[in-house]
Image (cartoon, helix red, strand yellow):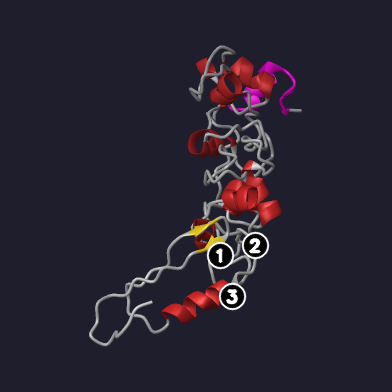
Amino acid sequence: NNIPDTSTYTGWAIDQSLYGADADSSADPDLDGLDNQTEFNLGTNPTLSDSDSDGLSDSEEVNTYSTDPLDADSDDDGLNDGDEVNTYSSDPFDTDSDDDGLTDGNEVNTHGTDPSDSDSDDDGLSDSDEINIHNTDPNDTDSDDDGLTDSAEINTHQSDPNNDDTSNDGLSDKALVDYGLDPNVDHTLLYNAIVQSIADLRAGSTVSQVINNQATITLTLEGSDDVQSRT
């Protein structure tokens, strides 16, 4: 029987094709920072510096990050240990490095969010809440492009962060907020009054202040020979 007994160091060294000085228990033939005795104890490959091919040397995994040198994805979150450490600065031993409720793998591979930042777009809503509760874009501070951040819509105005005109009255949420009006209330009459009032005016006419939900409409007319009177 010529099959080496790999349960012993000598048999393991033969099985790993270690001979001469390379077979010494204190040798490090793959130059990964772990000697043969340690590799034997761990079950790693003494001739490969990165036994699990995850981008981290066996020594880095054992001595620096405490990850598994035989498992490319120690926390089974969908990102290999090397990518977590070298690319995303996430924790290779924590499935959710930023504790936002999304696994690191889902953040990177599915949503394109930052696995090390619980609020990737810094809009005041966590990535998980944007995806799982509000259906907003966790990479866009203003998902509906109405000029109000997603957080301001949800936490301050209670408007819909996915609809730039929550009340469907023809006035954007931002416009109503700027005028001191509630973006959740239908202001169709106000909208129609504005549209009708300025329909025949030349470019440059403006609508001014709204205070305490009371609109004061001021129309400024530009000079023109065909304007006979002003009100």
Residue 18 in view (yes/no):
no
Q: Is residue 10 above or below residue 135?
A: above
Q: Residue furthest top?
A: 26
Label 2, on which residue? Answer: 184
Q: Quadrant of the N terminus?
A: top right
Numbered badge on residue 189: 3
Q: Is residue 193 left or right of residue 8?
A: left
Q: Residue at x 66, y 32 (%)?
A: 94
Q: Residues within 10 Å of mark 3 (few under 14, many from 20)?
A: few
Q: Residue at x 59, y 48 (%)?
A: 151
Q: Secondary structure at mark 1?
A: loop
Disc with the residue nearer the chain's start (3 vs 1): 1
Q: Residues within 10 Å of mark 1 (few under 14, many from 20)?
A: many
In-front residue for pair 53/13: 53
| Range of residues picked out in magenta | 2-18
Disc with the residue nearer the chain's start (1 vs 2): 1
Label 1, on which residue? Answer: 164
In-front residue for pair 28/198: 198
Cα separation, mark 1 vs mark 2, equals: 11 Å
- In the rendering, at what x and y percent does residue 208 appear? 43, 63
Disc with the residue nearer the chain's start (2 vs 3): 2
Which mark is nearer the camera, 2 or 3? 3
Q: Is residue 159 left or right of residue 194?
A: right
Q: Is residue 202 above or below residue 111?
A: below
Q: Give the residue type that dot 2 points to.
A: Asn
